[in-house]
Image (tube, rainbow, N blue to C red):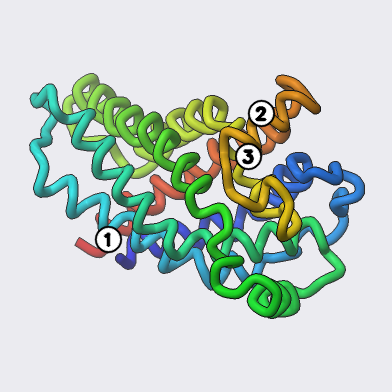
Amino acid sequence: LKAGGVAGVCVDLILFPLDTVKTRLQSPQGFRKAGGFRGIYAGVPSTAIGSFPNAAAFFITYENVKSVLPHGSSSYLSPATHMVAASLGEVVACLIRVPSEVVKQRAQVSPSSSTLRILSHTLYHEGIQGLYRGYKSTVLREIPFSLVQFPLWESLKDLWSWKQGHVVDSWQSAVCGAFAGGFAAAVTTPLDVAKTRIMLAKAGSSNARGNVLAALGSIWRTQGLSGLFAGVVPRMAAISLGGFIFLGTYEKSRQLLL
């Protein structure tokens, strides 16, 4: 819990500006109208509050599921074990992540409004359901992401450990995390764009219904391939750096605590 929480807070706060740029590039009104480079830390209180419990919930679920399923470097079931554990971890973590993400992204594209004001406005007009708008699209983004990132991360660590004859150090785990995160970020960008559009959609609009396929279809018809991959560069940069910091900090914190 502590190792996952510390890792989550570190990566979210350090890389917040890149996340803001990515969100504004993906927003329906476009980068400039969404704020450009102004108020780059808009929405950071929401992230600061949600980071620790979100990351802690993920790693508690991930490690516990991994411990009860068949695993080990010699087992052919090892990649499947990591996939299942990461997927269940994301489903649990999204219960905390989505409300934080909704408030954060709305603040990022409305830098003149405070986080508290956006939270109260969402609750008043949409209720608790408004805070969970995009839960399905977030899970549908995170599960494929985790299916790629975590087996790749574990495989790279196993390979590096085998080559050098001992378990990888925390910095080596971080390098593996950066590669795994960057690759997973690139291939799941269209799902991230759809999730952003759903969370930012006005209440009552077609995207507000949360249909991921409909959102992807709308983006494809209006903006084509470039629209589906809007923000891919800052997303890859943020998640590569994030994978380095997040997974490296997690391993180091776990080593120190255990």
Amino acid type indicated by mark 3:
Ala
Amino acid type indicated by mark 1:
Leu
Q: In this view, does 255 lie above or below 53?
A: above
Q: Is residue 72 above or below residue 109?
A: above
Q: Earlier in the sequence, mark 1 or mark 2?
A: 2
Determine the image quadrant of residue 148: top left
| Residue ID for mark 1 | 256
Helix, strand or loop status at disc 3? helix
| Residue ID for mark 2 | 217
Report x, y in % for residue 146: 39, 38
Q: How far apart are marks 3 and 2 (CA)?
A: 9 Å
Report the number of numbered marks. Answer: 3
Closest to the observer: 240 or 114?
A: 114
Asked if the residue at tag 2 contacts the one at tag 3, i.e. Cβ–Cβ closer than 8 Å, the answer is no
Answer with left or right where residue 66 lies relative to residue 24: left
Residue mark closest to the camera, 1 vs 3 = 3
Residue mark closest to the camera, 3 vs 2 = 2
Answer with left or right where residue 161 lies relative to residue 68: right
Asked if the residue at tag 3 contacts the one at tag 1, i.e. Cβ–Cβ closer than 8 Å, the answer is no
